[in-house]
Amino acid sequence: MAVNNHEVAVECLEVTYRLNRRHLVEKINFQVLQGEVLVLLGRSGSGKTTTMKLINNLLAPTSGEVLVMGKATTEWNPIQLRRKIGYVIQEIGLFPHFTVEQNVGLVPKLEGWERSRIQSRVRQLLELVNLDPQHFAKRYPHQLSGGQRQRVGVARALAADPPLLLMDEPFGALDPITRLELQREFGQLQQQLDKTVIFVTHSIQEAFLLASKIGLMQDGRLVELGSPDDFLKSQHPEALAFIECFQLPGTG
Ligand SMILES: Nc1ncnc2c1ncn2[C@@H]1O[C@H](COP(=O)(O)OP(=O)(O)OP(=O)(O)O)[C@@H](O)[C@H]1O
Ligand SMILES: [Mg+2]
């Protein structure tokens, strides 16, 4: 079947996740087309990470369903599904006792790639995220700065070339200059690699820099969904609260 650019990569249909009697997310609906960057924006505790875990099948919906490439996450073979997805988790999640090289090459190794192929892939990826392999390949995570660790996290998620990237505040906890640098690099990288990306942040600046679509979450619900332009026109109180934090270039 021919793949066209408007194919739906991820779709949430009335997705609810309940724990005990609490709704962590409730009746979430959205579609992400191939090659799009959906930014999930929301305050702390609004349900962003929970939504990511539902897409990755780390959690199964209490009701509703999440479709990845047209198939419900619960129907995917978990290993096959994870192969389609690169996940950059909120706390970076590098293995401390693995070198940079081993961290980035982990998924290809699990996939049974040959050593030389893994080595050249790791080198290529480190260059892609602007870490000189000569300097960084043999280091351990504790020998890196926070920003360098986050680059390694991104390289690792890209290693087996998955079509879908889930990125949960990958650039959090960085100084603003390094953060902007990484955001710009990532924006370019995304265009170059044409991945479908779901990106979580609580920074409206980051959302505007990267998003083709913004989904605003509040108390476990998706309260707005649209282009960045739509978002600026929103009258939803939570959208207005975020816009207030956003100094538009040229107006400040
Ligand atoms: N395992 C759990 N047990 C109980 N409550 C949980 C659990 N995981 C998350 N929650 C709650 O669910 C809500 C949504 O959490 P979630 O991690 O999705 O928020 P978030 O939007 O990612 O927040 P942050 O920006 O702080 O990372 C929060 O109120 C959180 O306390
Ligand atoms: Mg979170």
Image (tube, helix red, strand yellow):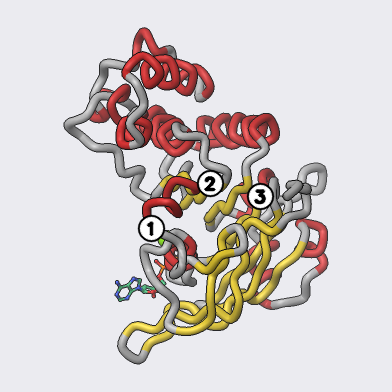
Q: In the visual, does 216 lie left or right of 26?
A: right
> Mark 3 or 1, which is nearer the eye?
1
Near mark 2 (Cα within 10 A), the count class, few <14, some 14-19 or many ≥20, is many
Query: Which residue appears farthest toward the top when viewing the image?
Result: 134
Kindly identify which residue carries mark 2.
165
Q: Determine whether the beta carbon of the residue marked 1 sits less than 8 angstroms from the nearest atom of ligand 1.
A: no
Q: Amino acid at mark 1?
A: Pro
Disc tally is 3
Q: In the visual, does 201 lie left or right of 138?
A: right
Q: CA distance from mark 3 to mark 2?
A: 9 Å
Q: Judge whether 111 appears above or below 165 on screen.
A: above
Kindly identify which residue carries mark 3.
37
**Residue 36, image x, y percentages:** 70, 50
Lower sequence index among marks 2 and 1: 1
Kindly identify which residue carries mark 1.
78
Q: Secondary structure at mark 2?
A: strand
Residue at 44 percent of width and 39 percent of height: 157
Q: Secondary structure at mark 3?
A: strand
Q: Amino acid at mark 2?
A: Leu
**Residue 17, image x, y percentages:** 43, 79
